[in-house]
Image (cartoon, grey):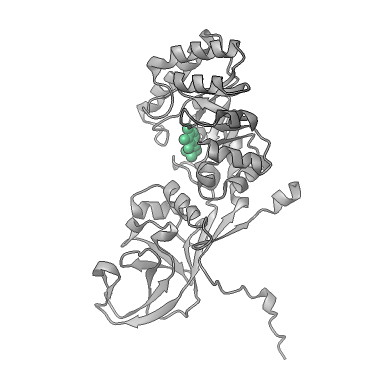
Amino acid sequence: MSAPCPSAVVPAAPTRPLLEVDLAAVGANVRLLAGRTGGGLMAVVKADGFGHGAVDVARTALAHGATWLGVTGLAEALPLRAAGLRAPVLSWLNPVGADWAAAIAADVDVAVPGLEHLAAVAAAPGRARVHLHVDCGMARDGAAPATWSALCAAARRAERRGEVEVVGVMGHLGCAEDPSDACNARGRTRFAWALETARAAGLRPVHRHLASTAATLTDPRTHHTMSRVGAGLVGIDPSGTTALRGALTLTAPVVSVRQVPAGTPVGYGHEHRTARATHLALVPVGYGDGLPRAASGRAEVVVRGRRRPVVGRLSMDQLVVDVGERPVPPGEPVTLLGPGDAGEPTATDWAGWAGTIAHEVVTGLGAATRTGTRLERRVVGAAHLRSLA
Ligand SMILES: *Cc1c(COP(=O)(O)O)cnc(C)c1O
């Protein structure tokens, strides 16, 4: 007589598309990155922690070796404080009219990229902790080099008046994913010049940070006192040099399966026709859930341990997989993206199919969990956090 199979150990069939966030993977990435930088580690949790959940990623990073948090706008910084995180936080991209008083009240450091920002920050009640931001060759955020001396001098005057405290200088490299690009040497030189200029103006910035993920992993000359790392926390290495672990897994149940003859057109525009008689499985995930539509015609997913092609155009809500000669039952789980352990595509694979970068894929998926009406979000690997709490 065989014992009845206890239903508790049978994995529940997936009932809707699910985005799993593995904080243990984030923790492992943080430990690796913290071991690679010569300075401190600022965990960059902008864009909701690259779609993984800003507070979850921040807590995990702080538990595994990061000592700072970094975000773009103040609207991303203040919720970290509201969640009870006490680590230093830097917010580096704000319009001149931002609520600097709120930043000061919440003990959030702010980056200052020019005289207008300096004046606004200095005028706010309290003494702001400021990181002067120099452009290191992107013509993007940060002070243009021609304005840097004047900014340093003005910041020193504001410091003497007690309006600000210049605790840092920051820059950012535009080509760090390719260490052989001459742009990197020019960026490093620019940053060294910016530090000298700040010192000559009488400033004593104790936090000097230039490197993000790629430079942290490839060029110790960029490390200074701290690295600002975002992509690497969630397993993305733009330099392609280091094995980091992806922290998202996207699965969905098959909705329905049909048998079709050779020559069957599939999806909008009939961009695909089946080459032979086969089975088509419908999966309820599309570009409305953050999968890039541009991956149509190239993407693959894993069904029953095998890679299968996504056929026809991805729709907003659904995609079609050619599962071959043998049908699968409705409800069959499909793995669309994951760390790659079981042969499933990674965020980098999806990015390659779509002509984009993995950053855009993961932030898009994360965004689709926000409303609660598209992807369900589930956090795993957080046991170490509970034990710390
Ligand atoms: C996003 C960002 C970072 C983090 O870069 P990663 O490549 O994701 O590590 C660091 N600094 C600035 C200014 C950024 O905008």
Q: Residue at x 37, y 70 (%)?
A: 320
Q: Position of residue 8 (x, y in %)?
A: 69, 75
| Left or right: residue 296 compared with residue 95 | left
The residue lying toward the viewer, choosing from 168 and 230, is 168
Q: Residue furthest bottom?
A: 1
Q: Quadrant of residue 297?
A: bottom left
| Left or right: residue 3 compared with residue 225 | right
Q: Position of residue 271 (x, y in %)?
A: 25, 67
**Where 332 sits versus 80, above or below?**
below
Q: How many marks?
A: 0
The quarter in which the N terminus is drawn is bottom right
Residue 264 appearing in the image: yes
| Left or right: residue 311 compared with residue 43 | left
Q: Residue at x 55, y 71 (%)?
A: 14
Residue 244 appearing in the image: no
The residue lying toward the viewer, choosing from 124 and 207, is 124
The residue lying toward the viewer, choosing from 13 and 285, is 285
Q: Quadrant of residue 61?
A: top right
Q: Position of residue 137 (x, y in %)?
A: 38, 25
**Where 5 sits versus 58, above or below?**
below
Q: Residue at x 43, y 56 (%)?
A: 290
The residue lying toward the viewer, choosing from 163 and 358, is 163
Q: Position of residue 258 (x, y in %)?
A: 37, 81
**Where 144 sits versus 309, above or below?**
above
Q: Residue at x 47, y 43 (%)?
A: 237
